[in-house]
Amino acid sequence: MPNTSTLNQAQRQAFEKTIREKLSEASSALSAKVKDAQAIALQKLIEKKGILELVTTVKALRDQTEVTENELESHGFEIRNDGIFASSTIAPQNSTKNMRR
């Protein structure tokens, strides 16, 4: 009786593809669980240290900074990382006319 447990090339490739897909799914699931666990641990640490109010304040200040920087950019200016203001590469047409007067 011949051994029927051998796989032909197409079957091996299909099996390999299935194994790779399952490995990818498992890796994605593990990454998501690790990310969730890190977020939970960080939240518990923040609460344990009693710094929730500070974290909330920092988030609010960062949001306000982003809004303010966007407003500056809409007027043709930007703030660099070192805190120095600079004119954007292209100033609005009417602002250059006003500067010449």
Image (cartoon, rainbow, N blue to C red):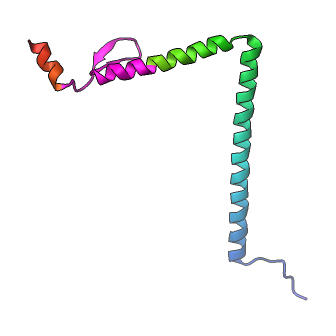
Instruction: Give the residue displayed 68% in from the left and 64% down from the top.
Output: 17
101 left or right, relative to 40: left
Residue 20 x/y as whole percent? 69, 59
Dividing the picture into quarters, in which one does residue 66 lie?
Answer: top left
Percent across and percent down for residue 72 are 33, 19
Residue at 63% from the left image edge and 11% from the top image edge: 54
Residue 10 is left or right of residue 85, and the answer is right
* Residue nearest the observer in this picture, 24 or 10: 24
Instruction: Give the position of the N terminus as an image quadrant.
Output: bottom right
Q: Residue at x 40, y 13 (%)?
A: 82
**Outermost residue, left direction?**
101
Closer to us: 7 or 23 = 23
- The span shown in magenta is 66-92
Q: Is residue 73 magenta?
A: yes
Q: In this image, 5 relative to 84: left or right?
A: right
Residue ranking furthest to the right: 1
Residue 24's spot in the image, x, y percent?
68, 53
x, y percent for residue 71: 35, 21
The quadrant holding residue 80 is: top left
